[in-house]
Image (spheres, rainbow, N blue to C red):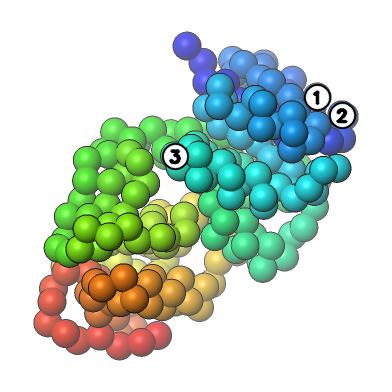
Amino acid sequence: MSAHILVVEDEPAIAESVAYALRRDGFSVSLAGNLAEAELERDRADLVVLDLMLPDGSGFDFIGTLRAARPGKPVIVLSSRDGEADRVAALETGADDYVTKPFSPREIVARVRAVLRRTSAQSATGEPRDLPPIVLDRATRRAEVSGAPLELTRVEFDLLACMLDGPGRVYTRAELIDRVWGDGFAITDRTVDSHVKALRRKLGEAGGDGGIIETVRGVGYRVGLGDGSVEEP
């Protein structure tokens, strides 16, 4: 059975062009022109293509409610905003990809397929990852420290999950950008550093050990060695 895509876009010409390209590629599609309609359709969608500027509110609000109710459901943002700050804000809120207008409908199809492949691969390895006192469950995208819930953004969760895949392995910033953000994002090393710093802070505040994420000077980051050598970026 093909994946079902929800396209949330208030400009009919754009919505129809995206829907046509997706249907031609074998997907089933439903359309919503505002947040109220999107809320009614969201549960049966396998992926949401979302405009940020809608008549009855912001797409950021929709991402927030979707992440609370359906943590693993992927979202691709469509937006005329092309600044790095907007891209980072969308990803931090929980978007999986970000496409700026104007765009090619064929590009949207390619992005949809790429995100579905990536999320399917993550679900296939959805067993909890442990590095006491941290427990991550990829399938539900829940994190715990010493048994207490740890509230992470999408980017923070994916950064930690990536590094927990190989405790002790050094991940370069370029590798983290590729695995967490993917292609098409103008993400800088400083952006990675700021997310790691926020992640360390949350781990410490939750009663875990922020120092479990170690900086390897001039290279990148690793977790799990426990030798206490931590350098702030």
Tell me the residue that label 1 is attached to.
16
Going 19% across and 86% down the picture, which residue do you hit?
229
**Residue visible at 34% across and 83% down?**
218
Relative placement, left or right, of 112 versus 215 is right
- Toward which corner of the image does residue 207 lie, by quadrant? bottom left
Mark 3: few, some, or many residues within 10 Å (few <14, many ≥20)? many
Residue at x-position 66% and y-position 32%: 39
Amino acid type assigned to the residue bearing label 1 in the image: Glu
Q: Compare marks 1 and 3 and give the one earlier in the sequence.
A: 1
**Residue 12 badge:** 2
Judged from the image, the secondary structure of the residue bearing numbered disc 1 is: helix
Relative placement, left or right, of 63 versus 211 is: right
**Front position among marks 1 and 3:** 3
Between 232 and 110, the one nearer to me in the picture: 232
Q: Is residue 61 above or below residue 46?
A: below
Q: Do the residues bearing badges 2 and 1 touch, measured as CB atoms within 8 Å?
A: yes
Left or right side of 233 for 2:
right
Residues packed near mark 1 inside 10 Å, few (<14), some (14 to 19) or many (20 plus): some
Task: Determine the residue positioned at 80% across, 52% down.
Answer: 80
Q: Tell me residue 217's x, y (percent).
A: 30, 85
How many marks can you see? 3
- The answer to whether residue 68 shows anywhere in this view is yes
Distance between mark 2 and mark 1 Cα atoms: 6 Å
- Could you give the CA–CA distance between mark 1 and mark 3, rounded to whole angstroms? 26 Å
Disc 2 is placed on an element classified as helix
Q: CA–CA distance between discs 2 and 3? A: 28 Å
Q: Which residue is mark 3?
A: 72
Report helix, strand or loop for mark 3: loop
Badge 2: residue crowd in 10 Å (few <14, some 14–19, many ≥20): few
Quarter in which the C terminus is drawn: bottom left
Residue 75 in the image: x percent, y percent?
58, 41
Residue depth check, mark 2 versus mark 3: number of the one nearer the observer: 3
